[in-house]
Amino acid sequence: MGKATPAAARWKGPGAPAGAQGGRAKPNPNPFEVKVNRQKFPVLGRKARHAVGQPGVSRARAVQKRTQTLLKEYKERDKSNVFTDKRFGEYSSNMSPEEKMVKRFALEQQRQHEKRSIYNLNEGEELTHYGRSLADVEKHDDIVDSDSDTEERGTLSAELTAAHFGGGGGLLHKKTPQQQGEEGEKLRSRRELIEELIAKSKQEKRERQAQREGALELTEKLDQDWKEIQTLLTHRAPKSENRDKKEQPKPDAYDVMVRELGFEMKAQPSNRMKTAEELAKEEQERLQKLEAERQRRMRGEDEGGDTRKPKHLSADDLNDGFVLDKDDRRLLSYTDGKMSIGEDQSGEASDGESEEEQGEDLSEEDPEDSSDPDGHSDLESDMESEDCGRPDREPRQAPGKRMTSGHRARGATRTELPYTFAAPESYEELKSLLSAKTMEEQLVVVERIQTCNHPSLAVGNKAKLEKLFGFLLEYIGDLATDDPPDLRVIDKLVVQLYNLCQMFPDSASNSIKFVLRDAMHEMEGSVEARGRAAFPGLDVLIYLKIAGLLFPASDLRHPVVTPALVCMSQLLTKCPVLSLQDVVKGLFVCSVFLDYVSLSRRFIPELINFLLGTLYLAAPSKHGQGYTLVHPFRASGKNSELLLVSDEADTATWQRRGLSLRWAGGLKAQTKTEANHTRLSCLAVCLALVKHCVLLYSSLPSFHDIVRPLGALLTEHLADRRHPPELQELCRSTLADMEKQERRCRPLICEKSKPVPLKLFTPRLVRVLEFGRKQGSSKEEQERKRLIHKHKREFKGAVREIRRDNQFLARMQLSETLERDAERKRKVKQLFNSLATQEGEWKALKRKKFKK
Amino acid sequence: MERDPGPEGVRRALGRLVEAVLASRGEANAVFDILAVLQSEDHEETQEAVRACSRLFGALLERGELFVGQLPSEDTVMAGSQGATRKYKVWMRHRYRSCCNRLQELLTHPSFEVKELAVSTLMKFVQLEGAHPLEKPKWDGYYLFPRQLFKAVVEGLLSPEDDCSLLLSRFQEYLEHDDIRYHTMQAATGVVGRVADRYPEVPLTFWNNAFTLLSAVGLPRQECSTSSFYVKHVELSRTWKVVHLKEHRKAFQLMWLGFLKHKLPLSLCKKVLVIMHDSILPHLAQPSLMIDFLTRAYDMGGAISLLALNGLFILIHQHNLEYPDFYRKLYGLLDPSVFHVKYRARFFHLADLFLSSSHLPAYLVAAFAKRLSRLALTAPPEALLMVLPFICNLLRRHPACRVLVHRPLGPELDADPYDPDEEDPAKSRALESSLWELQALQRHYHPDVSQAASVINQALSVPEVSIAPLLELTAFEVFERDLKKKGQESVPLEFIPAQGLLGRQDDLCAQHFTLS
């Protein structure tokens, strides 16, 4: 019975209303209509779909559906015409009639307004004037201006006036005579009139076009002819040409002015010049920003993959911002000689002696900046060529330099030296350039090499200057190993190195890495061979110091600084102190090391060891209580009394002075007193460094364990009262600092880690085995069987439906036949009746006649 | 005998003499001429003479023209009425003996070539004498070896005066042969004992020589069937001691024990200890006999103790040695120098082994962890990179020790309860302390170290970190690694402009150093 629905759907025509609404089972069925299908065995878990049926109801539903569909078709079986209503929503039952009407109206409106092209804005509603499109009118206007006006002046002018002067009257005026003439013959309809008008105007248009083309051809021909003649004219008489020229109207002063104004470069907007306070503020902001960045690197936060893109400098930027990224610089430097932003910046960097002075430089250069863009106009750009721009700049820079750095002597040397230097291609070349010159001259030479080979001047200059950095570094190494070391020149050259490093950070870092690796390699060789190494020369120490000056030493991880730190650690752990010179070197390394970590306040175990060892060397009485010496120091040995003052008298005469780096280079030929003084100075430096360490590390958790050996040794030093009072005071204050630091030991606690989430397993899906013959076959086989089964059932259902349809039809036909028979019977009966009546009447009449 | 000038002439003359002696017994007296040249001052001539002797006596030995048996004195034989052949043989044997004596003397010759030649000649005689023994075998199949001659060679090699390391390395190639090795061990034992008795203060060169020879003796791990003999024998008998590896081991053990029972200089002790676990202990018949030496070395302190640890470990591990207070002594070994000595890797490898047992008491492990972290405050970065994971591994193995890094409800203390001077780990109160040292090292200047120390901030992960690749780490490797590490593309720069070499006014360099 349930199969009625698909069958109905199959027979449902397109126009048939969605049926089967009335056939829904009622909630409270008639108990006599309900048929219960008895179940033979109750099976647990099986859904009984057809336990209860309503045969009467469903049969009625099926019959009703068939009458609506099948019967209809049957009745229309011999008819070929079909009526379809295409009005919108005619067959949709879920729209109310009002809605249908509204929608239909809207559709109609829309159809009218539909545009052929979405880009053509005016197409739908063309503006007209007296039935003519305005576009046409405009076209006519154009032509009026052209050469065709002579012939058709009369008519067109009338039109023109009509167009111009709101000419309803004009057109009427024109139309009236026509109409008057035509009215005489016959009255034409308005439509005919308009058509005529259109045809006329089209014809006119065509004519005008033809005329114009002719005129164009003629002009062309004339031009060609003129060209032919022109050559002759030029050959013959230049005078005539002059005359021609004169004939040309002289440009009016006003016109000239207008043109010039039109072409003139407009003053570009620029920032106003900044006041000194603003500049100072900006500088401060810049420094703050850089400091923040440094702090970030110190904490090592950029290791988490913070990739900063080089920021783009806007055109309005006053480029006072310090640019770290080299790429930026390359972006902004032009290859031709014009002053570029990159240049200005490097210029600033090169003469920036200090921040304030830099600020002043900026204010001096600001007018240049603002005036420069004016010079970039098309007219003047050629005049301002390369050789003009650079020398102009150089002298300007030079006085500033002289003023700020305060080397008046350099002015004199400048005049003697040549102005241009080729960048050295090899170290020997640089050395020959610099050798046998005074310090000032050497500096000037290096400076000029840089200016003459500025990267913005030529393409290869960048590589040249990058090489120059390496050569200068080598030169510094040579100067440091000289006897006596020329430290003053190094001191000044460091500034140049800094500037070069700012320009080429990558190559500079590579050069420094190279020299460090050299030093380490040498040391590693002797460590491998003998287990220890001698302190390296002064050059390595100076390289280490320079690395700290050029690169931010506080970074957690830096490509140059970190290896340099390891290198210093090696110096302090692998090099035994064998002489007073070694002590000076070691103390210098300690100072450099502490300078490296001055901002980051990081902990250096080796340094503490070294200071402990050095203090031990100077301890007058060695008890060895409370401390253990660490490699490379030994408790006993020939060098264990290296820093002991041999003569008491020298203690009194000693005055505290800074240690000279020269002693580290080559300390020799000292008298006994001098040696004693050096010893005391070393001790003083060592004590000062100890004090510094104590202050630096006071916040470390196990501070007291770190400094306990130092404290023990200092107490030993104090116990023996042979030291100068100044040093004793230093010891005492250091000890006091140590004690002052409170001992607080808070137990360590791990950070709470996130609780590990319970492991969740996704449920494992297992096919429930069906018991029966379907089991055991493959998936495809099962699918096939299922389909076959389904097909069989469907087929049976379809056959059943067809059979029922046929039964229904037969029933209908039967009832039709019965109906028809009954009708005929009824009609025959009626006929017989009427005939009988007629017969009866006729007989009655006949009877009457007889009677009469 | 005419003397041609130059070694060429000498050689030709000696050649003629040798030919003559070998050709007829009548020319036998020419031997004296040859032996006379052997005494020559000239190195070249001496060498030629040695070669001639080698040829001459080699041929005589092969021919069997030397007297076999107990050698009677020359005079009695000459005076006696034996046959001429016997007289000749006895006489020639005496010449042979004097030749050998001279060759032994030459072992102390200043020229290395002469020494080398003398050794090879003597070894050739040893080989020939072994093949054609000059003694009568006591019974059939009796093993005969020229012991006297060979002992003399070994004695010459172990000279108390000269450094014979070159000669010994030359001699080493003979030690490939089983019989030579066996007899060398026997001879060396005797020589060492005699020299040690003879001198009140044994010279260092002797010890060095002895050690070079002893360490050159290497026994095969397993008994191999095809034993190589220097002296060619027709047939090897199983009754000979020399063919058994067990006997070799006994001899080896006797030799080393005899050597080590003397008071050796410290440097030699170190050398012995370095090869102890690898080349000595496995070959001893009874390795536990080495315990005396190892204990003595372990008690010596310093680097020697560290080295003795290895041998002790093998004894404890494989030979069931019970060592009282082993961990206490190990604890005592930890001092700041362990991070700086050459044998750091070996020591920490062993310490890792010793502390790998999970049955150790927590107080002991805590004491070790605390001691190591205290020492880490003085260590260089390469050692820190190794010892920090080491400490963390200890904490991982012994969850009871995790209070050292995680004590949630502990009271705040005034001082560290740990007593660094206490020798007994049980009394050091390490378990009450915390590893504040690691917290301090989180501020270490080297990023890797601070990273390694920061591990304790979180709960320790379960798997242990293998320290094997970190053991041999050197500072140079750390340096290279840092140098090659690729960071961000641009190198950060210092933004404060440099003003001079010594930096700004407040820099320490500028404060304490001047350029003038």
Image: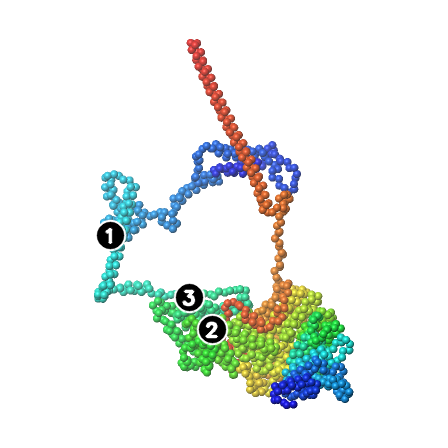
Residue at which label 3 appears:
A316
Quarter the N terminus of chain B occupies: bottom right
Residue at which label 2 appears:
A466
* Residue appearing at x 50%, y 76% in the figure: A473
Do the residues indicated by labels 1 and 3 lie within the same chain of the protein? yes
Q: Amino acid at mark 3?
A: Asp
Q: Upstream in the sequence, badge 3 or badge 2?
A: 3
Q: Upstream in the sequence, badge 1 or badge 3?
A: 1
Disc 1, disc 3: CB below 8 Å? no
Residue B261 visible, this angle: no
* Residue appearing at x 43%, y 13% in the figure: A845
Distance from label 1 to label 3 (Cα)? Answer: 57 Å
> Quick check: A89 left or right of B119?
left
Q: Amino acid at mark 1?
A: Asp
Residue at which label 1 appears:
A149
Image location of residue B508, percent across then percent down: 54, 77
Quarter assignment of residue B322: bottom right
